[in-house]
Amino acid sequence: MCGIFGYWDRGRRALDDAALREMARQLIHRGPDDEGIWHRPQRGVAIGNRRLSIIDLEHGHQPFVSEDGQVAVVQNGEIFNYVELAAELRRQGVLLRTGSDTEVILRLYEREGIECLRKLNGMFAIAIDDAREDALYLVRDRIGVKPLYVADDGERAVFASEIKAILPWTAARDGLAGVDIEAIHHYLSFNYIPAPWTIWRGVRHVMPGTWMKFTRTGVQTHRWWSLAAQCERDFEFGAWAEEFLAILDDATRIRLRADVPWGAFLSGGVDSSTIVALMARHVDRPVRTFCIGFADPRYDESPFAAEAARRFGCEHTSEIAELNMLDRWPQVLHHLDQPHGDASFMPTLRVSELAARHVKVVLTGDGGDELFAGYDKYSDYFARPGIAGLDTQAFQRSYFDSISLFTPAVKQGLYQPELAAQLSGLDSFTVAAQSWFDEGAHFDRVNQALYMDMQLLLSGNNLVKPDRMGMAVSIEARTPFLDWRMMEFAFRSRGATKLHAGDKKHWYKRAVAPLIGDDLAYRKKQMFTVPVGEWFRGESFGWLAATLRGSELLRRCFRPQIVDAMLEQHRSGSVNFTRELRALAALALWEACCAR
């Protein structure tokens, strides 16, 4: 796990070394152990890396460069099947000088070109400078576990793992004038800014499963993997469970490859318990597990985590944390670079801090809910009367509306008149969501909903959480459920295996019950969050009101009387505006810590 950065100038104009060193400095939390920069100013290209040393601690320095100096590679992430790929290369007569997974990427690319990506099982953002083609490749992993941003003004492209490392060397940032109003419009629908947009005009995500090739004349973008290539088929439960457990077991096994101490986040829920149970199969010592609890039993999962830890013989570390974490919100947003309305980033940072005292790698259960319908929103939506009778277009719009934060009408009423006129024809569903629905239209209705969330929610919010909060304290989070084999298997499985008569993760829970026990397999899901809405109504109302009213960005975009009405209605209890006020507060706090 690292941070990568660099630039490509089509006119061969060099970015100075001091600028590159500053880009590296901005990413030092992602890679505190080492720094490497490959700069060819005569060609107008550089790729760099800040390294968190996980594999081959002594010899894993990046960039890796071919013997003839024509190809250089940096990566952020890990290639979990690098052992098997290295063995294959050696059988072909390739000399590998290190035990690093990044050298494996270089050697595969030398032999097979960019098509070698299909062999990689991992989480990664990769930059490749290929002087033979006079081109720069930027690559993102299949589902977007690792972030990668780029700002391209047509002459120079600047890229990095985090936006903060890009902004000073682009025209994107110009105070609040550089904010992308369209991105805010989509943010109000999703509670996060969906890719490829970012809060800054001109800064965009490299999309998951995509590579970009920068040349002297332009840029080519290619989708090298698509989950939509899968087709559902029928399974008998026994065969399904056998394949599910075999894939997940191997995905967990290869994610234990590390030359540093590792552990797992453990909540006592079905996802983290399953991962820890599988980890315990492959090691000859207790698995280190980490959990935070709260004094308020409504939000405290620590007893369930302790139960799971005892069952699997773990070395368990748990702490009771302060419940009101609002003072941590600016720190969270600094690491996110963008507004996110999800309050669970704060406890995720807290448990990451706990784990970082002991390990450099953690395995997590992220992805299980999106693959196998684990959220209440799925059972609630599909239980609505009349959903089954909707035609395709009506279903797509209906599901989107069910997960939207602000409806189009509410957004129009919230905006200042000039902004309302500017955005009146912009539909977040049409622009940001419909193409994903259309791409997954061959799936059944449950899988269509899951497919959209895999493409938008997962990479836009839910994977940002473990990456940024882990990297804030220099630990790497690994996600066995998002092994490409598991993702493809999940979308070969019909929706009825996931959601049946309101039962979420229907076959999944049956499959893991013998492994983790019925009590853990069938425990009611508890969201990892904090009661922000209660604080907004009581002890933190004054703070919230001052935060919203003091924001220049909110005053510029939104009608103050509407925001004030939401505050007062929430405080009185007449309307629960927790999610809406949380999103507006995140936008205001982001402005204060990141936009000035």
Image: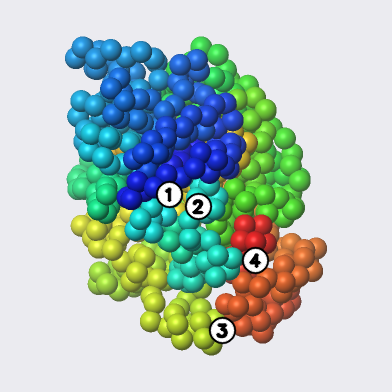
Question: Amino acid under label 1?
Answer: Val
SS label for mark 4 = helix
Eye-nearest disc, 2 or 4: 2
User: Sequence order check: which comes first, mark 4 or mark 1?
Assistant: 1
Calculate the distance from the C-alpha at mark 2 to the C-alpha at mark 3. 32 Å
Confirm or deny contact between disc 2 and disc 4 (CB under 8 A): no
For residue 158, which numbered disc appears in the image? 1
Confirm or deny contact between disc 1 and disc 2 (CB under 8 A): yes
Residue 361 appears left or right of 125: right
Q: Are there few (<14), some (14-19), or many (20+) residues within 10 Å of tag 4? A: many
Q: Is residue 234 above or below residue 184?
A: above
Foreground pick, 20 / 339: 20
Instruction: Identify residue for label 4.
Output: 588
Calculate the distance from the C-alpha at mark 4 to the C-alpha at mark 1. 27 Å
SS label for mark 1 = strand
Instruction: Identify residue for label 3.
Output: 416
Q: Where, by quadrant of the figure, is residue 243 drawn? A: top left
Eye-nearest disc, 4 or 1: 1
Instruction: Identify residue for label 2.
Output: 169
Question: Amino acid under label 4?
Answer: Ala
Query: Which residue is at a point 43% across and 42% down the rendered structure image?
Result: 6
User: Sequence order check: which comes first, mark 1 or mark 3?
Assistant: 1
User: Sequence order check: which comes first, mark 2 or mark 3?
Assistant: 2
The percent position of residue 408, horizontal first and vertical second, equals 45, 78
